[in-house]
């Protein structure tokens, strides 16, 4: 099927063979831009809060999900959180065994209703537990670019 071909039957599955040329520019939006600037420049996380709904969003949002109120007050919520849930990967994408298991966790940032999904670093996979306190580990400031990759992962709270 060609990309310009008219679809005449919506019940017959169609597919595209080969590559689809796609060009796009992804932007973080206003809230994401402020969040990643704080990560890059200060090594901290920002949140927005809806007082009416009593919700603190991390990553921050420009509008409340519940009441659609505009949120433009950003607060520094630090870098400490708790493991909400996690998974451990023992195999690579090709099915071969990893030298060291990787732990991917949902970390709820302390004092907020949101969090980040990222790797856990410096924690033995046999010791990880739901509710475990962790702290964000950042790349050195000179190496940060303003993206999720500026966060190496979350490590143990010392």
Image (cartoon, helix red, strand yellow):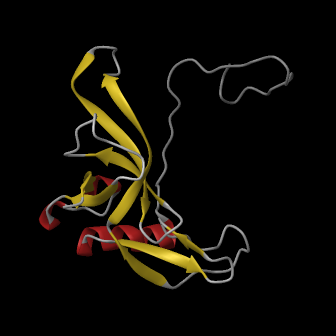
Question: On the image, which quarter does residue 53 sit in?
Answer: bottom right
Image coordinates of residue 85 in percent, x first then y, are 46, 45
Vertical placement of residue 93 versus 41, above or below = above
Q: How many marks?
A: 0
Image coordinates of residue 82 in percent, x first then y, are 39, 57
**Left or right position of 70 against 147:** right
Which of 7 and 54 lies nearest the eye of the viewer?
54
Name the quarter where the N terminus is drawn.
top right
Q: Residue at x 86, y 21 (%)?
A: 9
Question: On the image, which quarter does residue 89 sit in?
Answer: top left
Q: Residue at x 41, y 67 (%)?
A: 110
Question: On the image, which quarter does residue 40 sit in?
Answer: bottom left
Vertical placement of residue 67 versus 147, above or below = below
Image coordinates of residue 132 in percent, x first then y, are 35, 52
Which of 52 and 6 lies nearest the eye of the viewer?
52
Name the quarter where the C terminus is drawn.
bottom left
Image coordinates of residue 120 in percent, x first then y, are 29, 46
**Left or right position of 93 against 25:** left
Vertical placement of residue 19 versus 120, above or below = above
Which of 43 and 22 lies nearest the eye of the viewer?
43
**Left or right position of 87 against 150:** right
Q: Residue at x 36, y 67 (%)?
A: 36
Q: Residue at x 50, y 67 (%)?
A: 29
């Amino acid at each position: 099927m060609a990309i310009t071909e008219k679809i005449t039957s919506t019940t017959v599955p169609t597919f595209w063979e080969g590559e689809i040329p796609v060009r796009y520019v992804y932007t973080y939006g206003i809230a994401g831009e402020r969040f990643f600037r704080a990560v890059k420049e200060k090594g901290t996380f920002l949140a927005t809060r809806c007082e009416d709904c009593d919700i603190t969003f991390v990553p921050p949002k420009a509008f409340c999900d519940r009441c659609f109120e505009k949120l433009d007050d950003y607060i520094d919520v630090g870098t400490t959180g708790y493991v909400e849930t996690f998974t451990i990967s023992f195999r690579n994408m090709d099915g071969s065994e990893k030298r060291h298991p990787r732990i991917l966790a949902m970390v709820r940032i302390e004092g907020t209703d949101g969090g980040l999904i990222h790797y856990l670093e410096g924690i033995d996979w046999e010791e990880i537990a739901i509710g475990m306190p962790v702290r964000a580990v950042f790349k050195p400031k000179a190496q940060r670019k303003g993206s999720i990759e500026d966060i190496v992962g979350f490590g143990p709270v010392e």
